[in-house]
Amino acid sequence: MKRDLGDGFEVDDDPSRIDVDAVHRFLANESYWARDRDLETVRKIVGEAVRVVGMYHDGELVGFCRAARCAPKLFYLADVYVVDAYRGRGLGVELVREMIDNGPHADAKWFLHTEDAHSLYERFGFEKPDYKLMERPRR
Ligand SMILES: CC(C)(COP(=O)(O)OP(=O)(O)OC[C@H]1O[C@@H](n2cnc3c(N)ncnc32)[C@H](O)[C@@H]1OP(=O)(O)O)[C@@H](O)C(=O)NCCC(=O)NCCS
């Protein structure tokens, strides 16, 4: 479903519109979490995502996020970004809103990792996990 945000911006969950090269370019050059991810791996995990949301400006991909399904009602939100030139004008909020609140899995449990964007996700009900969540660090 496509949603017009005005000023040439729109969000869209059509996976066929995702410019995988652009996603890879951002992750490899500008993210703090996936600089070692090669193009084929990005293509694979974008293809395997249960849902992707792209942010577009005049048709060009300027933001992205994906959701992985871990269980029928458990999802992982990942690779959330808006390119630097368009940050700070509410697009990140709309991107996450489209994925979480406007998607078909709004009633499910979601989790994610973030270094510094906690307040962005708190708007959508994310909170510190309770004692049941464990994780094994990367080796
Ligand atoms: C995080 C990101 C997607 C936010 O996009 P954005 O379009 O700049 O965000 P918005 O303009 O919609 O505002 C986001 C809100 O979250 C808050 N926020 C919290 N942490 C933030 C952070 N690290 N970066 C940006 N905003 C942050 C902002 O202050 C803002 O709240 P406000 O409206 O009350 O001021 C964008 O800054 C980005 O791509 N950063 C680099 C990649 C990244 O860190 N992604 C998140 C990985 S978990």
Image (tube, rainbow, N blue to C red):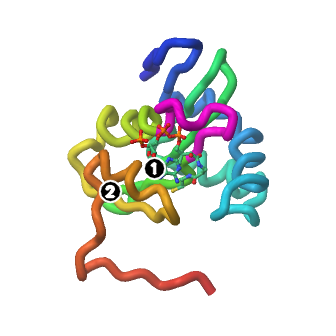
Question: Of helix, strand and loop, which one carries label 1?
Answer: strand
Instruction: Give the residue furthest to the top.
Output: 7
Residue plotted at (25% across, 80% down): 132
> Which region is colored magenta?
81-92
Total number of numbered labels? Answer: 2
Residue at the spot of label 1 = 67
Q: Quadrant of residue 133?
A: bottom left
Position of the C terminus by quadrant: bottom right
Q: Tell me if mark 2 has few (under 14), some (14-19) or many (20+) residues whose alpha carbon lies within 10 angstroms of its own.
A: some
Query: CB under 8 Å between callouts 2 and 1?
Result: yes
Q: Name the kind of residue labelled 2 in the image.
A: Trp
Q: Is residue 107 magenta?
A: no
Mark 2–mark 1 Cα distance, whole angstroms, equals 9 Å
Residue plotted at (56% across, 33% down): 54
From the top left corner, tell me how far across and down residue 101 is, in percent: 30, 37
Does residue 37 lie above or below 18 as drawn?
A: below
Q: Quadrant of residue 126?
A: bottom left
Position of the N terminus by quadrant: top left
Q: Which label was assigned to residue 110?
A: 2
From the top left corner, tell me how far across and down residue 118 is, in percent: 41, 58
The answer to whether residue 110 is left or right of residue 135 is: left
Residue plotted at (50% across, 61% down): 116
